[in-house]
Amino acid sequence: MTASTPDSLIGNLLDRWEMTPNDLKQEMREHGCGKQLDELLRHVDNPSPQTLSVGLIEAASNVIASASDTYKKRNGHLASFEDDSGEKCWIVPFDAFEGLRSAVEALATEGKDNG
């Protein structure tokens, strides 16, 4: 099991609750927890380059773990894909690929903002 960073934990909760960080801040302030939440959401609003790198590594690990070189055809037989040169192609679930794409985009955006 990989260690979760504060921003990935909060980000997952926000996604699950379909809330923005500001929605959650307002909700928590109404219940007297705004100060603690502000500290945690700082990680979501301004993730560190180290946090972004950890997210990229986690996303890449997820792609590697979920990749398959075969799929089951309707007739029950296993098959695989090859490109035009005969090289094996890997099959990756959409969610794993999208997680990796998002992590790369977040890291690239951070690099542009700081560069």
Image (tube, helix red, strand yellow):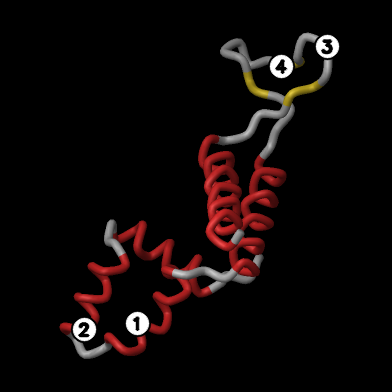
Distance, label 1 to label 2, CA atoms, is 9 Å
Q: Are marks 1 and 2 in contact (CB under 8 Å)?
A: yes
- Location of mark 3 (residue): 85
Q: Residue at 43% across / 62% down in the picture? A: 12
Quadrant of the snapshot with the C terminus: bottom right
Q: Residue at 56% across / 58% down in the picture? A: 110
Distance, label 1 to label 3, CA atoms, is 53 Å
- Secondary element under disc 2, as helix, strand or loop, is helix
N-terminal label among 4 and 2: 2
Distance, label 4 to label 2, CA atoms, is 55 Å
Q: How busy is the neighbourhood of tag 3: few (under 14 within 10 Å), some, or many (20 plus)?
A: few
Q: Are marks 1 and 3 in contact (CB under 8 Å)?
A: no
Q: Amino acid at mark 2?
A: Arg
Distance, label 4 to label 3, CA atoms, is 17 Å
Quadrant of the snapshot with the N terminus: bottom right
Q: Amino acid at mark 3?
A: Ser
Residue 99, how many percent across, how many down? 54, 47
N-terminal label among 2 and 3: 2
- Residue 42 versus residue 76: which sits nearer the camera? 42
- Location of mark 4 (residue): 79
- Location of mark 1 (residue): 37
Distance, label 2 to label 3, CA atoms, is 59 Å
